[in-house]
Image (cartoon, rainbow, N blue to C red):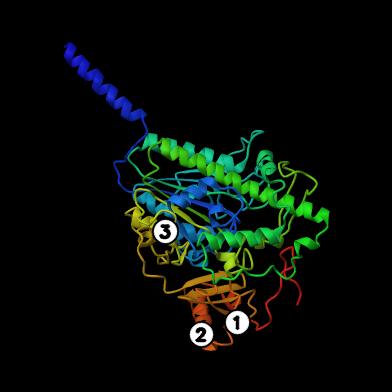
Amino acid sequence: MIRSLICYTLALAAVLACWSSPRSAQADPRPNIVIMMVDDLGFSDFGCYGSEIETPNIDQLASDGLRFRNFYNTGKCHSSRVSLLTGLYCDQAGSESLKRGVTIAEVLGQAGYSTAMVGKWHLSKQPTDFGFQKYFGHLSGATNFFIGDNSFRLNGEKWDDFDDDFYTTDANVKWAKTFLNESLAEQPDKPFFLYVAHNAPHYPLHAREEDFRKYEHRYEEGWDKLRAARYERQLEMGLIPKQWALSLRPELVPAWSSLDEEQKQWESRRMAAFAAMVDRVDQTTGQLVAFLKEKGVFENTLILICSDNGACPFERTRGKEYEPWDPRSYWCYDTGWSHVGNTPFRLHKQNQHEGGISSPIIAHWPAGMKTKPGAITAQPAHLIDFMATCIDLGAAKYPASWPNRELEPLQGLSLSPILAGETRKPHDFLYFHFATNRAIRQGKWKVVTHRASQWELYDIEKDGTELNDLADQHPERVKELSELWHKTAVETDHLNPKQTKPVSGKKPPLLQKDGRPASN
């Protein structure tokens, strides 16, 4: 009897130890998947993409993982979210309504994953209507980082428990850890899908005071020197080829040396606020990574970190007299700093030139990736590839039909071959559209137009910064690719005739410093 009792006690202790200790392995071998999208962050705004902003946690993921040189978003907030979630082009999926698409959460949920989201939604209804079992965040496209807005939701219900220390970026990761903790306790054998959609560093440029003070004087050198330094770091790290020349400062952005002291102080302070927001994203990323390690699930978790569009040029500042940690402030920056964020490219958010659609992306998955640590791939990829990747790695299926939706065929391709260190079969072409900004890339060739003015043609492999327009030298190529854009716009993306009017043939407009088009 005593021996039996001792054996039972030891067995019970072993079970309890396993239950309370971090999981070193899951019964289900499929990877957990974390997709993090930041908002209005330019190609060069992470340290591992050339920035002076301190992002050691994200940089470490890059050092141990993989970066992409040619990864594309859609150039705009909501359309990038549509493409990320559905694997379709924005209007192909029905834009914000998602009426012609399903989400990664819906597909992986059917395949046995637990699903959660935190952060900015910016689409119709709520995440809990589209497959996310748990959700915290705001439905709006932008929010006050300190006091929020009335669109905050927790699992489908209104949430307004804002305390004096509330800050949206911190809250996102706090709730992400809460949701994962619940999922790992309730369904320990299930892999999870987590979508973190930060509103930072989208305006208003709200920063915690301690983060702002760290950067308060860092931007007094100005945009000319700092942009040149970012470009040099990009070359040194092999992120971009040496033949990609640095694009010029926008014509209507003044040289830093021409500003008076008051202007320099204002410009340097608002960039410091932006940098502080990025720094906080990195701090919370470190907290999330530490949590995954603590729970024993880090090794088999694929982490993908990207941005929804290029840096934002639009000046909409209000409450300039208040500090950026005061919720009454509403600072923005403009083309002076957005062209730094988009180094080495030209143009900005909304444009379909490389400055608007090029995203930094870091992929990290210790148990699954076969690339050399710190590798950089030049293989082109797009947000539409995330759905196919999740289906592939999650052993899921893209549905043939879905209740109350008319599903379009999946547009993206899996990134799995690239993560395995292989060369994947590329897209036949990649299509881009926002408003009257258009582009299409096929192999090394790209045609692009700013506000439906003229079609420009670039050899994007040799001239990634789009400085040498070859349209006059290859008119047949322009005709072929522009026709392909129109065909795709109508047949695949379901654009109407007004959205597909021919280009005007006029000279592309310059942008004023505040981001608005200048009259030619």
Name the N-terminal-most of marks 3 and 2.
3
Q: In which quarter of the view is residue 207 placed?
A: top right
Disc 3 versus disc 1: distance between alpha carbons?
32 Å
Q: Position of residue 367 (x, y in %)?
A: 34, 48
Which tag is nearer the camera, tag 2 or tag 1?
A: 2
Where 17 sits versus 130, above or below?
Answer: above
Q: Position of residue 137 (x, y in %)?
A: 56, 44
| Residue type at the position of mark 2 | Arg
Q: Position of residue 183 (x, y in %)?
A: 41, 38
Which quadrant: the C terminus?
A: bottom right
Which residue is labeled 3 in the image? 387
Q: Position of residue 185 (x, y in %)?
A: 38, 34
Name the N-terminal-most of marks 2 and 1.
2
Q: Is residue 270 left or right of residue 189?
A: right
Image point (28%, 26%), residue name: 15
Tell me, yes or no, if residue 12 can be seen here.
yes
Which residue is labeled 1 in the image? 502
| Residue type at the position of mark 3 | Met
Disc 2 versus disc 1: distance between alpha carbons?
17 Å
| Residue type at the position of mark 1 | Pro
Which residue is labeled 2 in the image? 477
Q: Is residue 465 left or right of residue 204?
A: left
